[in-house]
Image (cartoon, rainbow, N blue to C red):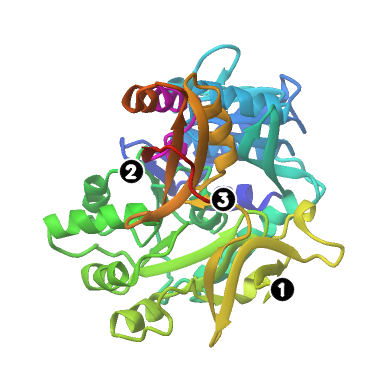
Amino acid sequence: MNATRAALLAAGSRVLVSDDAGRTRTGDELAGRVDRLAGALAGRGLAGGRIGLWHTNAIAAIEASLAVEWLGATRVPVDPGAAPAEAAATWRAAGTDAVLVDREHAGGEALVHDDDEPLTGPPVPPEPEIPADRTLLLYPRAVRSGELSAVPISYGNWEATMAANIVLYRDGGYGPGFGPDECFLTVQQLMHGTGLVGTFPFLRMGLPQVIMRRFDAGAVLDLLRTGTITSTMMVTGMVSRLADAVRNRPGGLGALRRLIYGGARLAPADLRDGVHLFGDVLVQVYGRLEGGWPLTVLDQADHRAIAEGDMSRAGSCGRPVAAAGDLRLGPSGEVRVRSPMVVAEYADADGWCSLGDLGRLENGYLHLRGRLDRMINTGYHVYPQEIEDAIRRVPGVAGVLVRGEPDERHGEAVVAHLVARGDVAPRPLVDRVDAELRMRFARYKVPRRYLVTDTLPEE
């Protein structure tokens, strides 16, 4: 039997998922709704197909993801903040057979599955035998000239990721004190790292969670102080905003034992401040979708040591975790990994995956020192060529360079350098470019700063 469905049925009448609007699902209810959604999709001939997903965080979003898994199909998620044109381009390039959305994103021929408007059919349980090399998650990165750049995470990769994270929770890799009272808070959008690290592993363990529709630091703090949440995951910018909320409303974080964060590391000063504000809860993870989530962990003891002045660990992303397999540096210093989490399409003949990150290992800790490509890491990964292609189509642009530049809160910020054509005025040009990008892309891809210059800087 599918491991997640078995855990849902074992939970029975216990509430496994609740949301910030007061809705709840017991294990039996969640399994039943997923079975019926899978039946509705199967009735439309979608078993084994490619299904686009476009949901804001909600219980229905979890149900949609699981229903695709039940059918042995492939899910192609799009960030809920994506522009409609970006979503449509992604699914067109991916060759999806249908798109499943919530009411907020409804339109065209998309099928709607929402908390208050469920899509139902005759119950269909999970396929009993799904080939391990079949793609479960086609994670989109960028679309250029109609071609999709995406990471095809297989059912086998997914199982290995679930197993690795469950071991890290149960065996203390994410920190001590893991027990039967655990409850996870899903606050980052489900399609990103939180699904791999928390949301779905907790379902596999039959443990409860709360899902918040959108991140709001004050609302998160209120929920933490109810004393029900023991674990959560955020991108680094969210951690900074939560720190601001605690400064404005001093006090503890309830029963929280681990605040996992990733995407970018905290600056040493922010890390020390976070330890003093939050206590021993911070856990940094580093991973890559093509290589595994996570690959290294900087745990609570490491954070405390840095806060107390041990700068040998400062700036690192932690130690390689056993569950992630082998990690080593290539001749150029590029990080390479080999494990069941590695996506086959990104591996060489010996199973090693080169991640594009340059690093050094010092006393067992991995320190990153840049990328071989131009990818920008804001906590989410942004590929500048995709943004540059869109900017070049705006009238009045003679030249463009998009790159990541240092940012106190996000590690890197997306910055666009523009050269204006002829006598085009800078301010109207920036306004046109910004408006165009906001119509085309999710908010995290839109530059935070625009600089109009006579010549472009070096890449």
Element assignment for label 1 = loop
Which region shows up in magenta? 432-448
**Residue toward you, 218 or 93:** 93
Inspect the image, locate mark 2, and give the three-letter code of the amino acid beneath it: Phe
Q: Residue furthest left?
A: 249
Question: Which residue, given by chain and number where applicable, does mark 3 sit on?
Answer: 375
* Mark 1 vs 2, N-terminal side: 2
x and y percentages locating residue 4 in the rendered image:
61, 50
Query: Looking at the image, is 66 positioned above or below residue 51?
Result: below
x and y percentages locating residue 151 in the rendered image:
68, 46
Query: Looking at the image, is 204 positioned above or below residue 75?
Result: below
Residue in the image at 47% along x and 38% along y? 445
Residue 122 showing in the rendered view: no
For residue 215, which numbered disc appears in the image? 2
x and y percentages locating residue 367 in the rendered image:
52, 74
x and y percentages locating residue 295 in the rendered image:
59, 67
Is disc 3 surrounded by few (<14), some (14 to 19) or many (20+) residues within 10 Å? some
**Residue toward you, 9 or 410:** 410
Query: Looking at the image, is 380 positioned above or below residue 454?
Result: below
Residue in the image at 20% along x and 55% along y? 244
Cα–Cα span, label 1 and label 2? 38 Å
For residue 190, which numbered disc appears in the image? none
For residue 330, which numbered disc appears in the image? 1
Element assignment for label 2 = loop
Cα–Cα span, label 1 and label 3? 20 Å
- Horizontally, is 213 left or right of 373 in the view? left
Discs 3, 2 touching: Cβ within 8 Å: no
Residue in the image at 37% along x and 65% along y? 266
Cα–Cα span, label 3 and label 2? 25 Å
Give the tally of numbered discs: 3
